[in-house]
Image: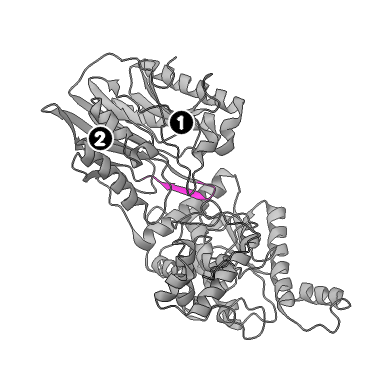
């Protein structure tokens, strides 16, 4: 069996190749299930007349497998799966390029490897050279890097430049493959979704294509995996750096590309012609995919949501319905003495629009009981946020009780603005197993809600037409934990807060540089302080899908105990 870099040339030479892009959704750790998914896609590709089927990075194990790759039993299962898939290709059907962790006796850790399977054999093995160690990636912890750059992989008269994910993004591997005679590049990827991903991927691919004069096939995973979303969006780029064919985002499928040799060069003559989406639709589909896969892959029968009559819980409910269907979403209004008549009406109307189960559980009896229990120890102390947080925690207890009794998971509803500054209650409104809005700033929550109200996206399970009452989008946001409360009692207006947070979180800008852009210095310093001191809350928050360049958790890893503040003062 070949080690990294070995190859066996399969028989047969051709001037044309039909290469299928298999945009599938592997599940991390489900090796047997992933083999079945790979086989189904191969059967579909065979029916289309494919010579070769290309899958995403680590499709056998799922990506990212994290510390699972340390387990010898897992390594053996992945190896056995690759060998079984190789044996499948002895049937005369399409060859395959698949990926899996691959442990050899010489290396301390497994390689992140890709394999050409053909003629019943592992015809070639290529291992990842560059292991990313930034953002959501920490591959040096898990994998051994290949020594040197890969050589071309021969397949039926073509020399394939097979490189894995990060090897495309940095100068070196592609150029070495081209110099060694590669005709075109095939690049299996596990490239996470973020708003800027399409532009960043195509820019990196363009650099390789223009530097080498070679076309490229980009194949990406399609899955939600904990906090990371992979949206597919495979493409073919020509030798000039132009995207000529596109597979859809957020959609599984097998997509055939047709290649032919012309004057000693290979070109892609035909392929999928999907339209890529952007803006609010792209972000909305990403959070729906993230929520759906988290719930489905963890086998929850449905979700429970505290529906308050506010925009965050309304949008969360819409996302859940679009992901699962209304019959799997249970919404609960839990009013207190401070809940307005408008909120009661808006929550009920929103539930009716979405077609979900809806019930009301007043919390006043529990509030009264807690106040009576605490009265002796709170004697002569003024009311403050303590009493407000008790209300939130009572609601958290009720939601978790419903979850325990039914087995349905609680979706929490806090947005990124609130998570940034700690405007949330531990063991209260932060209770839950997953948070679809965790990486969505409040201003974008409104934008996504308005977008969803105006459209009925194809392929989603929610109803067409209005799903969030207009008054929810126009009234002042409020936690309604005291009389007359609004969010802006404690925070700057969101259209001022969110740009400051984006500069502090995503851009890591210095306070003085933010102030230089026209923001009030006292406000910026206050928000920076709130951002730092809320770190302990975020560490206890549920996961949620990454959509920005920097999310809390996988990307931004600040210490909880942190004495730093950006004062621009001399260190004396």
Q: Nearer the viewer, residue 539 or 434?
A: 539
- Residue 72: image quadrant is top right
Residue topped by disc 1: 145
Q: Where is residue 122 drawn, in percent x and y?
A: 40, 18
Compare marks 1 and 2 and give the one earlier in the sequence: 1
Task: Please state the extent of the stretch shown in magenta in the rendering.
Answer: 225-232
- Horizontal side of residue 233 vs 472, given as left or right: left
Q: Is residue 450 magenta?
A: no
Q: Please tell me which residue lies in front, 238 or 129.
A: 129
Q: Residue furthest front?
A: 572
Q: Residue at x 61, y 25 (%)?
A: 73
Q: Which residue sits at x=68%, y=56%?
A: 403
Label 2, on which residue?
A: 257
Left or right: 297, with 21 as reference point:
right
Q: Is residue 327 visible?
A: yes
SS type, badge 1 = loop
Circle 2: element type:
strand
Query: What crowding class fits label 1: few (fewer than 14 Cα within 10 Å), some (14-19), or many (20 or more)?
Result: some
Q: Is residue 68 above or below residue 289?
A: above
Residues packed near mark 2 inside 10 Å, few (<14), some (14 to 19) or many (20 plus): many
421 or 528: nearer the viewer: 528
Near-viewer residue (328 or 280):
280
**Could you say which quadrant of the image residue 142 lies in?**
top right
Q: Position of residue 297 (x, y in %)?
A: 55, 43
């Amino acid at each position: 069996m070949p080690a990294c870099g070995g190859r066996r040339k399969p028989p047969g030479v051709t001037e044309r190749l039909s290469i299928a892009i298999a945009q599938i959704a592997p599940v991390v750790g489900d090796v047997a299930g992933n083999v079945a998914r790979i086989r189904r896609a191969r059967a579909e590709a065979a029916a289309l007349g494919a010579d070769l089927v290309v899958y995403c990075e680590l499709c056998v194990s799922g990506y990212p497998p994290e510390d699972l790759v340390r387990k010898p039993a897992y390594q053996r299962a992945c190896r056995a799966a690759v060998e079984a898939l190789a044996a499948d290709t002895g049937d005369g059907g399409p060859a395959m390029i698949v990926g899996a962790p691959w442990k050899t006796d010489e290396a301390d850790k497994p390689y992140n490897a890709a394999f050409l399977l053909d003629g019943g054999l592992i015809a070639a093995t290529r291992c990842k050279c560059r292991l990313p160690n930034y953002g959501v990636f920490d591959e040096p912890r898990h994998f051994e890097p290949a020594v040197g750059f890969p050589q071309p992989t021969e397949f039926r008269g073509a020399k394939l430049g097979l490189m894995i994910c990060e090897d495309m993004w940095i100068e070196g591997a592609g150029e070495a493959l081209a110099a060694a005679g590669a005709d075109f590049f095939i690049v299996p990827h596990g490239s996470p979704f973020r708003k800027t991903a399409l532009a960043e991927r195509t820019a990196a691919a363009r650099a390789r294509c223009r530097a080498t004069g070679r076309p490229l096939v980009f194949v990406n995973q399609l899955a939600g995996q904990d906090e990371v979303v992979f949206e597919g969006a495979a493409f073919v780029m020509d030798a000039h750096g132009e995207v000529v064919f596109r597979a859809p985002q957020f959609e599984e499928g097998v997509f055939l590309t047709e290649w032919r040799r012309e004057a000693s060069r290979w070109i892609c003559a035909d392929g999928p012609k999907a339209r890529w989406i952007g803006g609010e639709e792209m972000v909305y589909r990403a959070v729906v995919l993230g929520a759906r896969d988290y719930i489905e892959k963890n086998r929850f029968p449905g979700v429970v949501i505290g529906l308050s009559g506010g925009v965050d819980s309304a949008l969360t409910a819409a996302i859940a319905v679009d992901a699962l269907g209304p019959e799997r979403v249970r919404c609960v209004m839990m009013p207190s003495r401070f809940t307005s008549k408008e909120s009661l009406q808006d929550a009920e109307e929103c539930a009716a629009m979405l077609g979900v189960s809806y019930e009301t559980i007043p919390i006043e009896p529990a509030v009264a009981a807690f106040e009576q229990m605490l009265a002796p120890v709170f004697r002569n102390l003024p009311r403050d946020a303590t009493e407000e947080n008790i209300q939130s925690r009572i609601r958290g207890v009720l939601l978790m009780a419903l979850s325990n009794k039914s087995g349905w998971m609680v979706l929490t509803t806090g947005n990124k603005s609130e998570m940034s500054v700690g405007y949330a209650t531990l063991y209260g409104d932060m209770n839950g197993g997953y948070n679809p809005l965790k990486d969505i700033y409040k201003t974008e929550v409104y934008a996504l809600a308005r977008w969803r109200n105006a459209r009925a996206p194809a392929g989603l399970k929610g109803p067409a037409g209005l799903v969030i009452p207009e008054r929810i989008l126009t009234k002042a946001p409020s936690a309604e934990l005291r009389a007359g409360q609004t969010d802006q009692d404690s925070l700057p207006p969101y259209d001022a807060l969110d740009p400051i947070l984006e500069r502090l979180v995503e851009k890591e800008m210095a306070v003085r540089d933010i102030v230089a852009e026209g923001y009030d210095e006292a406000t910026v310093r206050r928000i920076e302080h709130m951002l730092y001191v809320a770190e302990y809350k975020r560490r206890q928050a549920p996961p949620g899908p990454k959509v920005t360049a920097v999310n809390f958790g996988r990307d931004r890893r600040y210490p909880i105990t942190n004495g730093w503040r950006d004062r621009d003062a001399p260190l004396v």
